[in-house]
Image: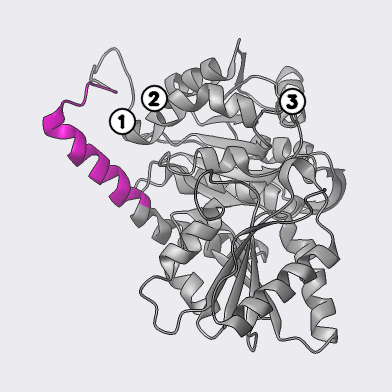
Amino acid sequence: MSKRVGIEVSLGVSEAVKLSNSDCIAAYPITPQTHIVEHLSEIVANGELDAEFIPVESEHSAMSVCCGCSAAGARTYTATSSQGLVLMSEIVHIVPSLRLPIVMTLADRSISGPISIWNDHTDAMSIRDCGWIQFFAENGQESFDAHLQAFKIAEDKRVLLPVMVHMDGFILTHMIEPIEFLDQSEVDKFLPKNYEPIMQLNPEKPFTMGAVGIPEIYTEAKKVNDYILQESKKVILEVWKDFGDKFGRYFNPIESYKTEDADIVLITMGSFGEIAALAIDELRKEGEKAGLVKIRLWRPFPYQEFYNAIQNVKGIGVIDRAITYGTEGGPVGIEIRSSLYDMPNKPVVTDFIAGLAGRDVKINDFKQMYYKTKEAVKQGKALPYQFIGVRG
């Protein structure tokens, strides 16, 4: 029977990995991800989870070990952040091509330099085109639920792709929140206890994984990767519905808040969604037709659901937490403008870069971004992208 517990969100994620009956955990500690794998090492050492916990000398080794474990047929998990992701990125790009259903938590943190351990989405955006399924959690409960869903999605025989769950470093990882835990028997009805691979390294039945992709086959291999990632959306929606039907908590690729009659919407990803919603509430009290669109599914990008959410709006304010250097805005803003290119009567899009390296973004900042977007609509053209909260 499910129970509600006040717990640090990182530890809640560890408990979700335990409930998922993971067979292999390989990880290297890096702030703010460390508490997740520390707690998992305790869980395994205490005999609460029958799994191999493999301490390694670097994040590059962590993902390499995960590849070996998954290829051998083990349900496999790891976690990292920031510079750790950068170090393991060589192997991260290989995993989808090998069709290995590894689940990884990315405790999102800014990438140095200057040196920073605080939260933004710099690391997330550095790896957006790696071929993994990726979705963002907004709070502790979503972080817990998302990991149970991630294993089921990844291991579905129509998918067999790795899944990356993004959760904001410190803002989520180190916060104590109420999380409704599920009983092991409930989880076992949702997620099969054992992963049954289609392809498995076995010395008695040898075959090749990760062969050289000569020019005559490389393009076709990349086409398959893209096709499978696009098609995975059907399975993601199925799993999210199944989870909602069983446990009453439904996930959607795009979450809309007060958008039914909105003229202007703000767009967020991750934990910013909750404080942005408070700003929308205040704006509504001030008579503004304001709304909020929260992107949960980042890859594959849910274009149709996004169009449905913004089809009647006049202006969009995108809140980016990373920079795309040398271009006109942040990565999410560029994505949104690109997606609207062929849309008739498309809304005016203004991009805001905010909250880098944990810089506070307060309710009034969100309201400021709303009013700047409203001004852009009044002028009939997007304002240049803007940094919010720059001093000096």
* Residue 21 visible, this angle: yes
Q: Are marks 2 and 1 in contact (CB under 8 Å)?
A: yes
Q: Nearer the viewer, residue 33 or 114?
A: 114
Q: Distance between the residues labelled 2 and 1?
A: 7 Å
What residue did someone put label 3 on? 43
Q: Determine whether 196 is above or below 213 in the image.
A: below
- The range drawn in magenta is 210-229
Tag 2: Cα neighbours inside 10 Å, few (<14), some, or many (≥20)? many
Q: Residue furthest toward the front?
A: 392
Asked if the stretch drawn in magenta spans residue 220, the answer is yes
Q: Where is residue 223 in the image (x, y as percent from the top left)?
A: 24, 45
Q: What element carries label 2?
A: helix
Q: Which of marks 2 and 3 is in front?
A: 2
* Residue 1 visible, this angle: no
Give the residue drawn at x 77%, y 40%. 173
Q: Determine whether 332 is above or below 286 in the image.
A: above
Q: Distance between the residues labelled 2 and 3?
A: 24 Å
Which quadrant of the structure image shows residue 295? Answer: bottom right
What residue did someone put label 1 on? 199
Amino acid type, residue under disc 2 in the picture: Ala
Q: Residue furthest toward the top?
A: 57
What residue did someone put label 2 on? 71
Give the residue drawn at x 63%, y 24%. 50
Q: Which of marks 2 and 1 is nearer the N terminus?
A: 2
Q: What element carries label 3?
A: helix
Q: Determine whether 79 is above or below 381 in the image.
A: above
Q: How far apart are marks 1 and 3 (CA)?
A: 29 Å
Q: Where is residue 85 in the image (x, y as percent from the top left)?
A: 57, 28
Q: Position of residue 73 (x, y in %)?
A: 42, 27
